[in-house]
Image: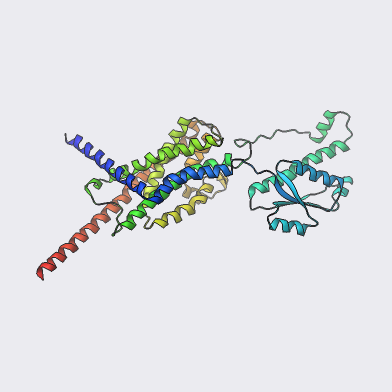
Amino acid sequence: MSIFRNIYEGLADICYVWWEEMKQVFHDEGVIMFFFLVPLAYPLIYSWIYNNEVVREVPVAVVDESHSSLSRKFIRMCDASPDVAVAYHAQDLDEAKSLVSRQLVKGVYYFPSDFDVNVNRMQQSTVSVYCDMSLMLAYKAVFQTAQAVSMDLGTQLKTKWGKNYTAREEAISTKPLDFDEVALFNPTGGYGSSILMGVLILILQQTLALGIGLSAGTTRENSRFGWLIPVTRHYRSLLRIVLGKALCYFMIYAVMGVWLTIAVPSMFHFPLLAHWTDILMFIFPYTLASIFFGMTMSCMVKYRENVMLLMVFVSVPLLFLSGISWPLQNIPSFWQGVSWLFPSTFAIRGYVRLNAMGAPFCDVLEEYRFLWMQVLFYFCTAIAVYHFQIRLSRKDLTRRLDEKRQQQLADAVE
């Protein structure tokens, strides 16, 4: 009977901690914002912005000092492309640079005065391309358009000058080694299909850590003695405290995880190659690891503002360290080791492989195992830091009782 009684008391304490934590979540406007509004709204705004995948009709300026039929043909071909629009014809390069500095154009095509002369002399001619590097998508459109037009125009000139009798001979002489360019895993070459998948995963971890840290900061600010763990009979077991709080967060983010990893990619037609059961099975340990990671970090938060300064600051570095926006082999070993401390690193890699590359679940078993290892590690650290908080709370309570008893004795003596 004592075993069943202990089980009943344990479940009752877990439910009590869960209920108290749930009430605190819904009574704190900041936690509501990070647990509900940000995960719901931020992916929608981000996805709407990048839903077109690539930029079109990027404005450029042209400086044509050649004034030849060949330079005009080059300009017309660039203007006819879907990525670039010739917006200005500048008199010289200084005027074109002024247009770039005023953000009226994103690039400049410069044709020297000997552009047509060199071509007719059977000499190599050049077209200078100046790009605004502040926006990589615009730079890509301006540069690649000029590159494609120059290759196409060069092929036409080879065909014109070649002494060939058939179309087959012209094709072989202008392009002796033919090839087909196939973009793997990102056929549109867009931002949403490559980077946004990792951003959605990172949002889950960051909002969880922000919400849990904000809740802990609120508890400390409202407590006179900075207690994080109430000293009541329902908070007598570390395991029950951690499980009760984790259950509250998991119930909320079980819904948010499905929204971020399945619903949002489906709404905006991002790659969704994995079966929904594989996604849920992979996201399950990631959600748990993020919860215990947030609970561990929350014990380091003394004021509400601290967690926002910490977690928002590391968001962009974590995206780079995951290896989806910067080659993993080019990241120093030290920073790769640092990235292993965060659950988002392995979750982003595994989720992108599953969803964007169509990998089977067996190909992400390494990331899956690392996530479960982080679940165990951060579960232990959460218990350790909560144990420290309980000791601190009991120590402060004992000190208060001793001070009160001494004051009563002093009053009785007087």
Q: Is residue 369 visible?
A: no
Residue 320 in picture, x, y percent from top left: 54, 48
Residue 382 in picture, x, y percent from top left: 34, 47
Q: Is residue 264 above or below residue 92?
A: above
- Locate residue 304: give its quadrant: bottom left
- Locate residue 92: give its quadrant: bottom right
In-image side of 278 versus 152 (left or right)? left
Q: Is residue 309 visible?
A: yes
Q: Locate the C terminus and report the quarter of the image it occupies.
A: bottom left
Badge count = 0
Q: Is residue 68 above or below residue 275?
A: below
Q: Is residue 175 above or below residue 91?
A: above
Please name the residue shown 36% across and 48% down the image.
Answer: 295
Please name the residue shown 83% across and 47% down the image.
Answer: 71
Q: Foreground residue, 176 or 136?
A: 136
In-image side of 64 versus 296 (left or right)? right
Q: How is the image coloured?
A: rainbow
Q: Locate the N terminus and report the quarter of the image it occupies.
A: top left
Residue 250 in picture, x, y percent from top left: 38, 40
Residue 168 in picture, x, y percent from top left: 83, 28
Q: Is residue 299 above or below residue 352?
A: below
| In the image, farthest residue toward the bottom | 414
Please name the residue shown 70% across and 43% down the image.
Answer: 83
Q: Foreground residue, 300 or 322?
A: 300
Please name the residue shown 89% across and 29% down the image.
Answer: 165
In-image side of 66 versus 128 (left or right)? right
